[in-house]
Amino acid sequence: MGAGVSRPRVSVVMPARNEESSIARVLDEIPRALVDEIIVVDNGSSDRTAEIARTHGATVVHEPVAGYGRACLAGIARARDSGVIVILDADYSDFPDDLPALLEPIVANEADLVIGSRVLGGVEPGALPWNQRLGNRLACRLFLLLYGVGFSDLGPFRAIGRDALARLEMTDPTYGWNVEMQAKAIIAGLRIREVPVRYRRRIGRSKISGTVGGTIRAGTRIISTILMYYPSYRRSRRDRRR
């Protein structure tokens, strides 16, 4: 980040469910000079995820009811004093040292929401299975066709200004969290930017793309969420033309 630019308080929110094999590596690689607090949301783990997170300097919040969006909401509620919220998965698939690229546009007041694009940054072979790639491509195409905004990815590694996040009034408790944020950001007229981030094979098995049932549920939720907010997008366009 540029010299002389004042930096807002930054909180990293990490949803985590049974990630004891990976979470220490993620926490140890976060650039601490850029972050004021790290909040790990233990989303009903049955292993030592919470204990390991504490010993590696994170604040632990417990959300026993499973759900990615629900865990994100719990972490965001705890980070009430922060100016920027970063969402980072706990499975070591993202590279924590790509964090400066996400923060820079927000600190420079050039963006409100910054999405880390794995497609633009480079994906390690095998890191994104074919079903996840296909679903990602279809969802991005649907955004372009309906909302007129061309995303390359629905990447979970992202940063958003606190005021911008408050405007979105996020509610989705499960798999539709990322697309809800992107759809609502378009509707609200937020400045959205994608930046390249790297992506590698996660440690452990995915709770979503690792099973057929999880893939179907996630895909259905994602597509239905994009469609659900389309009427709101149409209304927002009509209102802006008046």
Image (cartoon, rainbow, N blue to C red):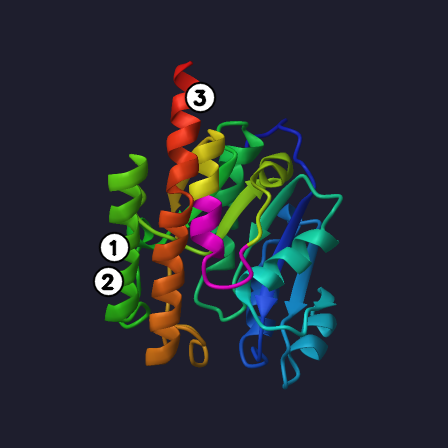
Residue 134 marker: 2
Among the 4 quarters of the image, the one containing residue 126: bottom left
Among the 4 quarters of the image, the one containing residue 7: top right
Going from N to C along the chain, the mark reached first, 3 or 1, is: 1
Report if the CB atoms under discs 2 and 1 are less than 8 Å apart.
yes
Which amino acid, by three-letter code, is at mark 1? Arg
Question: Residue drawn 73% across and 73% down?
Answer: 55
Question: Would you say residue 218 sits in the magenta stretch?
Answer: no
Residue 137 marker: 1
Q: Position of residue 132 (x, y in %)?
A: 30, 66
Is residue 149 visible from the viewing direction of this image? no
Which residues are drawn in magenta? Answer: 172-182
Residue under label 3, please give it.
239
Which amino acid, by three-letter code, is at mark 2? Leu
Is residue 95 visible from the viewing direction of this image? yes
On the rendered image, what quadrant is the N terminus found in? top right
Give the SS element for disc 1.
helix
User: How many labels were placed on the picture?
Assistant: 3
Give the SS element for disc 2.
helix
- Cα separation, mark 2 vs mark 3, equals 34 Å
- Cα separation, mark 3 vs mark 1, equals 30 Å
Q: Is residue 136 left or right of residue 22?
A: left
Among the 4 quarters of the image, the one containing residue 69: bottom right
Question: Would you say residue 178 sits in the magenta stretch?
Answer: yes
Q: Position of residue 102 (x, y in %)?
A: 49, 44
- Cα separation, mark 2 vs mark 1, equals 5 Å
